Each structure stands twice: as structure tokens, then as C-alpha cells.
Image: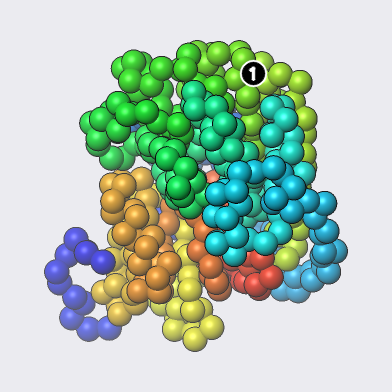
Amino acid sequence: MQTNSSRRPSSGRRPYSGSTGGQSGSRPSFNRNRSGSHGGGSRFGGGNRGGGSRGGSRGGSKRKQPTFDPSQFINKNPIEIAQEAYVAKHTFRDFKLGGLIVENVEKLGIETPSPIQDQIIPLICDGKDVIGIAETGTGKTAAFLLPLIEKTAKQKNQVTLILAPTRELALQAEGEFRKFSVGLKQYATVCVGGTGIRPQIRALGRNNHFIIGTPGRVLDLIERKVIKPEKITNVVLDEADRMLDMGFIHDMRKILSGVSRDRQTLFFSATMTDEAERLVNDFMQKPVTVSVKKKDVTNSIAQDVVPYEHVHKFDTLLALLGKDELKRVIIFGAMKHSVEKLANELVHNGIKAESIHGNKSHGQRQRSLGAFKSGNARVLVATDVAARGIHVDNVTHVINYDLPNTFEDYVHRIGRTGRGTKSGQALTFVPK
């Protein structure tokens, strides 16, 4: 990883003085009834919620320190719940998908539909609007892509718009599309912020069947008359709750209001907030709901706190990373600049680390994520942009170096470990 400084410490470790998530000598207290004005139903302390693709952060104020009771982060004996094996009612051939699509699925080694795929693909194939209550990692991307690819194979005039909260999620959806659509001569363009808009405008000049993007950049392109919403026949809102939480509600409403009412609308979310319900009521036609909830992540991951003194916070982190069991680690920080500085300091101290945050370009973020996924970096230091939708196998530990803004953000952060049948551990730094 490139660092901003070429100088290494002259001896030993260098103290790190980034955001601490709390002041030394004060123990944070968690208050579930705390109210705020941060949009998206946030109930806790503030911080800016970057608008993402339309020019970065939408707030300019200093981050308000969240408050939590440290006991919320302790669960040394996670519950091991025997999950009853789901018996699928269909095979992929039962969905009447085209032969090429089924072949592409089989080549990827996917033999049996996941619960969300098994229950929702037939509804989408029937042309219904659907609400899928499902978390990341349940196979929901394939659940909406496969029937829409089939629909497009039969009706060449189909144009699908997929909205996702982050660049990473949009790119992952486009990657899945490429795998499932091999040989079908269907095309997709990714439209996200943090990268040049001109190549996207050029790509949109061809006959695209799928447009995958973040709400801010998609709305920019609509306002430039490059994307013509009246031609869109299908809309997918992926991770809708996260888009709402990030402040995209007005962009989403503007986009949907310009699309024909004859469209098919697919809504996927891990939770259903009041704001999400209003969106559903305003823009969907008699939707059918399918709910596939996984186990409670806060009960299934080992969790503990790491007490620290302010001046020794970085040394405490280095001591932790010196343990062999921390093999692949995501460290969450509060601010973009402090995340970058922390990653650089880890590199200076001999730890292979990368960073991912909103100030990095699209290409830089992808290179950092690629290095972490490939094992070339042991540690990924991230802001909450990485808390949802980034799939990295075998993350052994999540470390909350800075406290999250909300308890929901905490749950999303620690969900990066203990995925599938794997065990994981989450450690949260709290001041002494």
C-alpha cells in the first residue's frame, strides 16, 4: 500500500492519535431512546452520513461522539443454534429459465436454490412486484438477476435499473450479472460516483439492458438526459434500508417518479422501517412479501471489549494484532482521514494493511479490497462504507477501533465475520 510518508519510525512503535470514539477517563453509556435528526430512522449519536455518489459527504459538521453501554459489546459465549436444513421446493430448471442461464448457474457450482431464491424467483417470473426481506449473504442478488435476465432474453426491449447504496455493491451486482448472462448478448453499465462520469455516459450510449448504480450518480445522469427513465421497465432497490439510512430517499423518489408505472419493482431490504414502508406504498403495485431472516448476528458471534487508555490506544491495537489467531481482520474507524492514517501507521509497524473509505477513488478502493481478499493484506481498515455488502471470506476478527454511530451500524460491522458456518470474533475499543 502506498503511504503518505516515506519515513519509518526511528525506533519501536509510533503513537497513533486518531479519533478515539470517546474521551479518556469517561465510560460511554448506551441510550436506546436517544433521538436525533439524522434521517433514515437513526436513534443514536450523529456523524455525517455521506451522500456517496453525488459529491461525497452531505454533512460538514464535526462528528458527534456516539454513546453506548460497553456491556452491549460483550457476549463471550455465543449461542450455537442448529439451523434446520432448508429443503428447496424447486430446482433451477423448475423456474423455466433458459438453458444457457441454467448452464451458467451450474458452471458456477450452484446446485440448489437458496431459500430467498426458491421462494421469490417464481413470483418475479410471474411479473409480480415483490418485497424480499433478506440480509447480505442470502443469495438475493441471484434471486432478482436470474428471472430478469430470463425476462430480457424473451423481451429484448427490457431495461432494468438496479439501485444499490455503494459502489462496491453495484460492482458486485454487475459481476454476478456477467457470470449469469454469459452467451446471451446482454449488456450492463455501472454508474457510480467516485469515478469519471464521461466513460459512463459513453457506455450508456449503447443498448444497455441493465443499468446498475448508486442513486446520486443515476439521478445525475437522468438530469443530464443520458438515462431516460421512461424507457426503464424494471427497477430493483437493493439494500433499500441502507440507501434510506445514507440519505438517498429524495434521490430514490425522484428516480422512481420518472419511471413508467407499468414497471416491475423489486424491493430488497434487511429491515422494514416506516420510511421504507412509505416508499413501498407509494411506488409498488400489490407487492408480495417474502421474508428470509438469518440468525441474530449479535447472538452468534463472540464479542468482547478492549479497554484502553487514550495515549496507549495504538499500542493496544498492535498488541492485539500480534496474536496469531487474528489472521484476517477488518478494523473500523470513524473518519476517513483517521482510517487512512491508521492504515499507514500499521504499515510502518510491519503489518500488511490496506484502507477503504470515501476519499479514495473507485480504482483505489477496488485495489485495496482486492489485496485484502487475495491475502496480500492481512488487515483492512475501513469506515462504515464497508459495513454492508462487502463479501470477504474467512474474516476471523472485526475490531471496532472507533465506536459506531448506531447500534445498527455495530451489528452490520460485526456481521463481516462469522459468516455462513464460520465462527468469528468482534472486539470493541472502549476507554477506561
Quadrant of res 34: top right
**Which residue lies at the image location 65% right of the left edge and 72% below the top edge?**
422
**Which residue lies at the image location 55% right of the left edge and 49% below the top edge?**
100
Q: Where is residue 385 in the image (x, y as percent from the top left)?
A: 46, 48
The residue carrying mark 1 is 283
Q: Where is residue 220 in the image (x, y as percent from the top left)?
A: 35, 23
* In the displayed structure image, the side of residue 31 where residue 237 appears, left or right: left
Q: Position of residue 178 (x, y in %)?
A: 45, 48
Pick whichever, 94 or 323, lies toward us.
Answer: 94
**Which residue lies at the image location 48% right of the left edge and 14% below the top edge?**
230
Q: Which amino acid does label 1 sit on?
A: Phe
Quadrant of res 185: top left
Quarter of the image where the N terminus is located = bottom left
Quarter of the image where the C terminus is located = bottom right
User: Looking at the image, can residue 116 be seen?
Assistant: no
Pick whichever, 334 or 398, lies toward us.
Answer: 398
User: Looking at the image, can residue 282 be seen?
Assistant: yes
Residue extending farthest bottom: 324
Q: Position of residue 116 (x, y in %)?
A: 72, 47
Tag 1 secondary structure: helix
Residue extending farthest left: 6
On screen, 163 above or below 278?
Answer: below
Question: How was this image coloured?
Answer: rainbow
Count residues near mark 1 (Cα–Cα under 10 Å), then give few for <14, some for 14-19, many for 20+. some
* In the displayed structure image, the side of residue 227 where residue 158 appears, left or right: right
Residue extending farthest front: 99
Picture mark count: 1
**Which residue lies at the image location 62% right of the left edge and 55% below the top edge?**
137
On screen, 171 above or below 394?
Answer: above
